[in-house]
Image (cartoon, coloured by chain):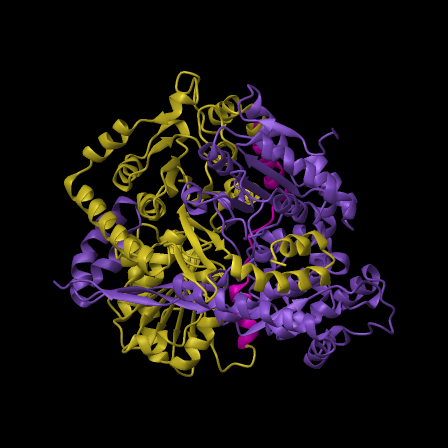
Chain colours: A yellow, B purple
Amino acid sequence: MSVNLVRQLNSHDADFAQALKKLLAFSAADDAAIEAAAAKILADVQARGDEAVLQYTQQFDRLSKDQANSVKALEISKADLMAALNALPQNQREALEAAAQRVKSYHERQKIESGCHSWDYADEDGTRLGQKVTPLDRAGLYVPGGKAAYPSSVLMNAIPAKVAGVSEVILVVPTPDGVRNQLVLAAAAVAGVDRAFTIGGAQAIGALAYGTATIPAVDKIVGPGNAYVAAAKRRVFGTVGIDMIAGPSEILVLCDGKTNPDWVAMDLFSQAEHDELAQSILLCPDQGFIDQVQKSINQFLPEMPRQAVIKKSLQDRGAMILVKDMEEACEIANSIAAEHLEISAENPRKWAELIRHAGAIFMGPYTSESLGDYCAGPNHVLPTMRTSRFSSPLGVYDFIKRSSMIEVSDQGAQHLGKIASTLAHGEGLQAHARAAELRLKK
Amino acid sequence: MSVNLVRQLNSHDADFAQALKKLLAFSAADDAAIEAAAAKILADVQARGDEAVLQYTQQFDRLSKDQANSVKALEISKADLMAALNALPQNQREALEAAAQRVKSYHERQKIESGCHSWDYADEDGTRLGQKVTPLDRAGLYVPGGKAAYPSSVLMNAIPAKVAGVSEVILVVPTPDGVRNQLVLAAAAVAGVDRAFTIGGAQAIGALAYGTATIPAVDKIVGPGNAYVAAAKRRVFGTVGIDMIAGPSEILVLCDGKTNPDWVAMDLFSQAEHDELAQSILLCPDQGFIDQVQKSINQFLPEMPRQAVIKKSLQDRGAMILVKDMEEACEIANSIAAEHLEISAENPRKWAELIRHAGAIFMGPYTSESLGDYCAGPNHVLPTMRTSRFSSPLGVYDFIKRSSMIEVSDQGAQHLGKIASTLAHGEGLQAHARAAELRLKK
């Protein structure tokens, strides 16, 4: 027997709660040095604008003055985006366009179903109340450079913004040593990105938040980035909106033991291959099945190009947990509140009903997380690190905002004025009271 | 002629853009000492739990060991909340309950209209996609102590949470020197608050975010507070959700010159009386009307109990701006993106259509902001400091979250698997590709 690569836990063990807590423990280190560096860059960009952006870009992305002699020169034209798309091999272009079409179609449905519309009603005395929904004017999309530059993320961030009706989506992507990722550019073309700049880091976040002579200020910044980008986003929150600060990716598979163990093993791999800090966990009531998955893991691992990352992630942060039954698996899943939750079981909706906290729920053996990552339609930007307890997948609703609409009739003002006056006096706010009283007819 | 209390600007002046920018300039000082103090308290509460909470409460709220000998002793029982309600004068109780009823009714409508429901559809190959909506398990509501303790804010924060279906709403309110605000307790009873603790400051935020032996950890913290509370909320963001960090209150009145100038003056007062930093601005195309409002201000000011605050606020941060016409007023209003926007004009909806950015829009002369603050129904927790460009009034949607639901059919997996495989190989994520490929039927 080979040794198990992935640690095994048993929900029956006396120390299980403690072991689970230890397994899940992760905190993005608050690095004071990174925070200070990001703050300094932001302040500099706010003060010096284009000049500061250019200087940091030359420095951090190792661009010579010939490659980058102005921020204007760092803009990628729409023609360049289209050229990147046109230069793709036919199968890649078709896949990208098919994925974009499905993502768009899902988010169009989401726009309708998720209340991204204005509404209004009148009460009995003619007072009209409601909310007006308006898309953001301008959104900024941060795309990491180098190895973590994912064209699929361009689609997932830009498409909901465009479906929401955002007038201008501005993409920033660093190009270390001047190397442009053609798939990212092609995805920007497919997603309808309006403008794109080859800048990154805290300086790009500063440019988007404060605006410079060349780069217009946006209203919200979305998209993942490194620790400097995360620190900068956290800091500009309030000046602009931001999406969540993403942690390492997570998958939790609930399996009744009836799925092909190879499929489950590969689904665990597909999270683990992202990052050594990524977390893959299996919950299953069947020890025999767990053993089979361990076997599949041992068998597949040597074939995987990213085996080093997968192995470290599974060893350090992975687990297989033997549970009493699927009900208990659902309870544990709620306490984990995973980013990706696969319910690989017969009648998966029965178990999904018991789930309160998860970023996305993948139901049934055919729904591999990777299908959702690329092309099923729903967004792959999902809440990590237990934040699915209070936050949602990135969606059209992140690119609209609401204004309350209140039109009190003269009749309504008589009734409401007395209530407001009483409460305002109770709070010691006499001008509030008086403003209501002035509208009362004697 | 008396001197004008409020500064006047003219949109025709060459330096108007500059003057407007200066008028609006405000930044909540990033006070490093406050941030460090809040961070230290949070870390201490995380490490020592109840013991730390108790110690800071005794210290900062000047409670003796007799008044506070355990965190358990700091809990206000439901009976105490009900007793506070029962002890209110009849007119206050009726006003509070009438306001609560209207706020509840509006938010119930909002729950339906704003997409706080699950949805689902199937595509042509039997793949089912959708989103599941779940209320948060537990929400924390911070209520400031002392003079800024507003019972109306208890209603506005707790009611949307309860309408959303949050199981447990936990209120914290500091009681300096042991003094409880009976109106706040009564409002908590009316709003259906589940548990209440007399704690405040960064220590209360820490207790809600991390949980202690006595105080359960919540999933989201809402409600305004002082600079320490704001710094602590910003810091625990990610561990829990938070609402926006609120700045000083703002009102912008767009008036066509046909409203009673006394009404407009008092509406400007009712914002100014909150805080010396509050901002009240009037935009009007009629200089004669602006003069009348200045006159009303001079006339009313001596009668106001909070005249010192009103005067300083209006002098330092107020303005009356003469505009070319109402169209221009709407343009300027969009650049200001005010928390409260009154359109005091004939046919106000004509102008409201031109407004893209405002927290709440009060339409017509009878809709004083104070009616909206207390009892019209919509929420009075609104985005300040231009954040209405990207954020919304507090609402039911802040107390629910969504999970994507994906169930790919075996047929769907054939089609989607090929797309996912191509894209995953393009991104160098071979396990993602393989997971999709394993589901392909040979």
Where does residue A156 sit, x and y in percent of width and height? 33, 48
Q: Is residue B188 above or below residue A33?
A: below
Where does residue B389 sit, x and y in percent of width and height? 48, 43
Is A202 magenta? The answer is no
Magenta part, dominant SS: helix
Camera-nearest residue between B141 and A144:
B141
Q: Is residue A32 above or below residue B439?
A: above
- Tell whether A419 sits left or right of A101: right
Where does residue A317 sit, x and y in percent of width and height? 47, 61
**Where, quadrant-wise, is the N terminus of chain A in this rendering?**
bottom left
- Tell whether A383 sits left or right of A260: right
Q: Residue furthest left?
A: B442
- Tell whether A76 sits left or right of A425: left
Q: Is residue B318 above or below residue B400?
A: above
Q: Residue furthest front?
A: A442
Q: Quadrant of residue A415?
A: bottom right
Is A39 magenta? The answer is yes
Camera-nearest residue between B133 and A363:
B133
**Where, quadrant-wise, is the C terminus of chain A in this rendering?**
bottom right
Report the number of numbered marks.
0
The answer to whether any part of residue B46 appears in the image is no
- Tell whether A83 sits left or right of B284: left
Magenta segment range?
A: A16-44
Camera-nearest residue between A149 and B117:
B117
Q: Quadrant of residue A65?
A: top left
Camera-nearest residue between B307 and A92:
B307
The answer to whether any part of residue A405 appears in the image is yes
What residue do we see at 70% from left, 42% from top? B277
Where does residue B187 sit, x and y in percent of width and height? 66, 70
What residue do we see at 61% from left, 38% from top? B281
